[in-house]
Every structure is written in C-alpha cells, then in structure tokens.
C-alpha cells in the first residue's frame, strides 16, 4: 500500500543495526571492509550490491537518495556535494562532443555560465528560448539536440513553465527532459509526473531548510542515472555522509516547513503587490502571475520565493537592502530566516546587462526567500525598508 508523502519522508530509513537505534546513525567512514578475496572481487564487479567506498555510496547517502526518489516518483538517483555538482555531472555524463541543449533562458547564473563558457569547450552548444515563448521550442531542436532543460519556478524571476507541454515535446523528439526542481521541492511539485526524465535539486536550499549544509541530487530514469553514477564515481563529486544525514533528517519536516513558507510567501506577495513603491510582483500563486493557471495545475502551493521590483532602479534596490533590519542579506534561499537578495548586483552580476534584462532581472529586482518568522514581522521589515 502506497503511503502519503509525509509518511514516506519520515519512515523511509536504513535497516536498524544490532543496537536497535530509533534514529539512523551517522556512518562516518571512508571505506567498508570485505569478508574475503571473493567478496571483494564480486563487490567491485558489481555482482554484489553493497557499500565499497563513500565516494561511490554510503548508507546515509543511500537513505537520502531513496527518500528523494520516493518523493519524486523516480527509479533511482545519485547525491552530490552541491546542487551545481549535480547540474554539471548530469550534463557531463549524458552529453557527447557535438551534442546540443535546448534550455529556457531563465536559469541560475552558474548554470548559464556552464552553458556559455565551459560546455562549449567540449563542442556542446545551447540554444535558449524565453519563458513566454515556449511555442518556439520546437523550432530550436536540431538533429544533435539531446537535452531539453528548464527550471520551474525560475531563479530569480519566479516564472513558471508548462512541464506537461515540454514533457510531450521532449517525448515527441526523443529528448532527455531535465528539470531543476529546486524552488518547488519534491513536496510542491513532481516533474516526473509531467514527463521529466531527470529531476535535479540543490538540497542546500529548502530541502535542508536551515542554511547548514551543501548538497545536491539527481533522480530519474535508471538507465540515465546509471551513466551519471559511473561518471560521478570516477570524478568524485560525492555528497558527504554527514551532510546526507542532515539532509535526510530535514526531509522529515519538509512538508510542515513548506506549508508555512508558502502561507507566509503568499501574504508577503499580496502585501507587496499593494505597495505603491513596488512596480510588480511575481509569485506563482498570485492571480496576477502570467502562468498562474499552469502553476495551479502542477504545483501544490506557490513556493517560498517572491520576486518584486522596487521603483527607482539599482539605487532604490540598494537603498532597500541597506534599510533592511530583521531579514538577512544573503545569497542563499529556502532558509528558516527570511532572506532578501539583489540579483543584479550579486547572484546574477556576472551576466551581461542585456542577458539579465532578457530574463527579467531588472536593476530594481529583489528576490525574497520568505522564511518561518511570524509573517507580520516579515512584512513590517519589508515595509519600513520600502518606506525608508
């Protein structure tokens, strides 16, 4: 009998040891021992499924990956030291020289740098489409196109893409559909239901939820994850057992935290939308969001990220940040503490101005990662900063 999300998150655990512990212990070991020469041989040839070395697998990492797989409806997965390690390793494992990627233009700054600076070294090119020009995706597909890649909601603009439509396109053209699901988390959205082959997370964000550790994970089709595993086993971007243990514990409370994050974020978005010093607000579950109906179709709630533009451009954006008192100024997101970021001067500052504006990152845009403080206190801080 299938269990509810919350139950799977809490009750998916390693087998208990002889000590009958209730909470899964930490396995802080670099390697594992073998019974004899034959056991060692069979383990390295993968005739036996077992832990060999923590760069390959570790009990804590395996538990974390199993939970994510159950939450996402994935066949299997592999965990990484960071979210960007997951992104890079996924592309490096699945692409060959001469292959082509079709991607939404609105992607995280480091992912954009990967597409434009590093993958071209191996003769891998990327063609971009705007989030509001999904009808042009098919025209960008070439004979060597191998991957269709999107984030939804996007970072930092909170745009939403129709995953079902893109999943059907990918299937029609035999492409690998890869979705960065970081903003939504497995609790709010499961892209595999809409046709995704691989789902990627920066576990550093909402999955951890308290700004403590770094981590990443890719889950999906077993044949594709096998290639990612082999690449990663040999190149070494593995998640540490300690971080895996922390992240697995965090998943037990993800549903509770996410519900409150989303409740607070919607109230913050509604407050900002009514403020006379704000040009616009983007939040997936605001009715004014251009893709509101799509968001309602594929997401449980709207997430914890609110994007808004302060009137007055880059100077007004800086003044707003300098006037913040309670909220944190940080490049992270998905924390218990509310964080405000000015993407144009921080997370996306490496992008050319033309590229920033192309994806809606205006000089006055602010990304607010709404935390778990009392929502009235969050709003009060944002209000005094806007009125400063």
Image: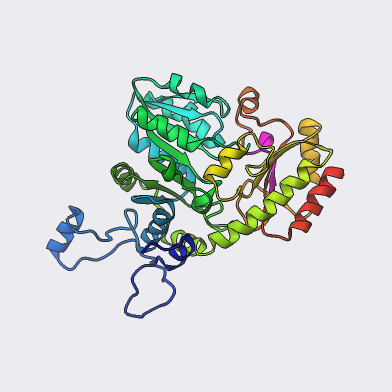
Place of residue 300 in the rendered image (x, y in percent of width and height, measured from the top left):
55, 50
Looking at this view, is 16 or 134 the one in front?
Answer: 134
Is residue 343 inside the magenta stretch? yes
Q: Is residue 201 above or below residue 63?
A: above
Q: Residue at x 69, y 54 (%)?
A: 264
Q: Is residue 360 above or below residue 200?
A: above
Q: Residue at x 35, y 63 (%)?
A: 59
Using the rendered image of the protein, determine whether residue 154 is visible from the camera's viewpoint. no
Tell me the magenta residue range. 338-347
Q: Is residue 234 left or right of residue 292?
A: left
The quarter in which the C terminus is drawn is: top right
Residue 105: name its quadrant.
top right
Using the rendered image of the protein, determine whether residue 172 is visible from the camera's viewpoint. yes
Looking at this view, is 243 or 24 the one in front?
Answer: 24
Q: How is the image coloured?
A: rainbow
Residue most toward the left? 38
Is residue 238 inside the magenta stretch? no
Residue most toward the bottom? 19
Number of dots carrying numbers: 0
Q: Is residue 337 left or right of residue 174?
A: right
The quarter in which the N terminus is drawn is: bottom left
Place of residue 360 in the rendered image (x, y in percent of width and height, measured from the top left):
65, 30
Place of residue 237 in the rendered image (x, y in percent of width and height, measured from the top left):
40, 47
Residue 172: name its quadrant.
top left
Q: Is residue 167 above or below residue 1?
A: above
Place of residue 255 in the rendered image (x, y in percent of width and height, measured from the top left):
55, 60
């Amino acid at each position: 009998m299938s269990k509810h999300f919350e139950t799977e998150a809490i009750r998916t655990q390693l087998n208990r040891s002889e000590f009958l512990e209730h909470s899964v212990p930490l396995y802080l070991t670099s390697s594992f021992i073998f019974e004899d020469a034959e056991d060692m041989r069979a383990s390295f040839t993968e005739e036996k499924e077992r832990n060999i070395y923590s760069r390959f697998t570790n009990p804590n990492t395996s538990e974390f990956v199993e939970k994510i797989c159950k939450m996402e409806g994935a066949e299997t997965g592999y965990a990484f030291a960071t979210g960007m390690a997951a992104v890079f390793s996924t592309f490096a494992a699945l692409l060959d020289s001469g292959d082509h990627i079709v991607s939404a233009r609105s992607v995280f700054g480091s992912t954009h740098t990967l597409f434009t600076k590093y993958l071209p070294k191996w003769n891998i090119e990327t063609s971009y489409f705007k989030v509001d020009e999904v009808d042009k995706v098919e025209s960008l597909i070439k004979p060597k196109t191998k991957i269709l890649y999107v984030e939804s909601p996007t970072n930092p603009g909170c745009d939403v893409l129709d995953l079902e439509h893109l999943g059907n396109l990918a299937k029609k053209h035999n492409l690998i559909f890869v979705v960065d699901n970081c903003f939504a988390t497995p609790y709010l959205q499961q892209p595999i239901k809409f046709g995704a082959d691989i789902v990627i997370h920066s576990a550093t964000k909402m999955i951890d939820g308290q700004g403590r550790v770094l981590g990443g994970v890719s889950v999906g089709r077993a044949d594709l994850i096998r290639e990612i595993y082999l690449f990663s086993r040999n190149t070494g971007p593995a998640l540490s057992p300690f971080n895996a243990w922390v992240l697995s514990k965090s998943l037990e409370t993800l549903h509770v935290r996410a519900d409150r994050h989303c409740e607070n974020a919607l109230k913050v978005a509604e407050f900002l939308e009514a403020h006379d010093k704000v040009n616009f607000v983007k939040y997936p579950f605001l009715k004014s969001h251009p893709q509101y109906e799509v968001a309602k179709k594929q997401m449980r709630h709207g997430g914890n990220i609110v994007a808004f533009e302060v009137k007055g451009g880059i100077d007004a954006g800086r003044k707003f940040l300098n006037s913040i008192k309670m909220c944190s100024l940080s490049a992270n997101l998905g924390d218990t503490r509310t964080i405000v970021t000015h993407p144009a001067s921080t997370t996306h500052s490496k992008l050319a101005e033309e590229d920033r504006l192309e994806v809606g990152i205006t000089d006055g845009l602010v990304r607010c990662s709404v935390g778990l403080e009392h929502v009235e206190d969050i709003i009060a801080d944002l209000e005094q900063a806007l009125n400063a």
